Amino acid sequence: MPYDALRRAGSEPKLALTFHGTGADASQLHGLAQAFLPGHHVVSPQGDVVEGGAARFFRRHGEGVYDMEDLGVRVAAMAEFVRAETERTGAGHVTGIGFSNGANILAATALAHADLFDALVLMHPLIPWMPDPAPGLAMTRVLITAGRSDPICPPDLTQGLADWFTAQKADVTLAWHPGGHEVPQSEVEAVRDFLV
């Protein structure tokens, strides 16, 4: 299942993939990755599921209620896409950056295919299930950013996801801000500090 994607060629054998939130497009985080990871190849796929006119990466039945069968199909397709882009660019280091629905497809893909990414930036993720152990994520660098008043991503589930990654022996940083589902400057700075 090929994805339309924005691509910027880099000067190093490193790859950054960005994954947009619901209703956005492939450009949402593309520039951020280019700015913070200037030597990387940057690839930003466009979500190919449409919900009420809004682009997403997988189907859901309601807020926080995922179509798990569809998610499994989409994760397999995304893993194939990431492997192909890694091979195409010759990258020996792969970073994933996702916001909201993009963070969810990124996290779900990394949970199922622990060898794909060396670093993950999960901005406002919502993983409403307890993942199986994934010892292959040991030593993976993970940044989770979130709002303590986020009505879409409950803070207890965010903390639970961070704790799960820690239990897999990942190198986890959790950056909170007091707001909701928006991305304030402090969150952008946390992403920059993690990546640079």
Image (tube, rainbow, N blue to C red):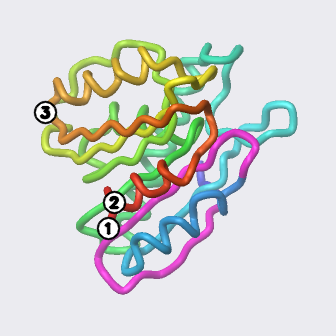
Judged from the image, the secondary structure of the residue bearing numbered disc 3 is: loop
Which is in the foreground here, disc 1 or disc 3?
Answer: 1
- Residue toward you, 45 or 62: 62
Q: Position of residue 73 (x, y in %)?
A: 53, 31
- Residue toward you, 156 or 12: 156
Judged from the image, the secondary structure of the residue bearing numbered disc 1 is: loop
- Count residues near mark 2 (Cα–Cα under 10 Å), then give few for <14, some for 14-19, many for 20+: few
Above or below, 66 relative to 119: above
According to the image, label 2 marks what residue?
Answer: 193
| Left or right of 196 on screen, residue 81 | right
According to the image, label 3 marks what residue?
Answer: 169
Residue at the extreme right of the image, as rendered: 53
- Residue toward you, 124 or 76: 124
Three-letter amino acid code at the position of disc 1 = Val
Mark 2 vs 3, N-terminal side: 3
Answer whether labels 2 and 1 touch (C-beta < 8 Å).
yes
Range shown magenta: 5-24
- Count residues near mark 1 (Cα–Cα under 10 Å), then give few for <14, some for 14-19, many for 20+: few
Q: What residue is at 72 percent from the left and 49 percent from the top?
A: 24
Q: Position of residue 15 (x, y in %)?
A: 37, 67
Mark 1 vs 3, N-terminal side: 3
Above or below, 190 relative to 171: below
Q: What residue is at 52 percent from the left and 17 percent from the top?
A: 154
According to the image, label 1 marks what residue?
Answer: 196
Q: Calculate the distance from the C-alpha at mark 2 to the C-alpha at mark 3.
A: 21 Å
Picture quarter with the C terminus: bottom left
Disc number at residue 104? Answer: none
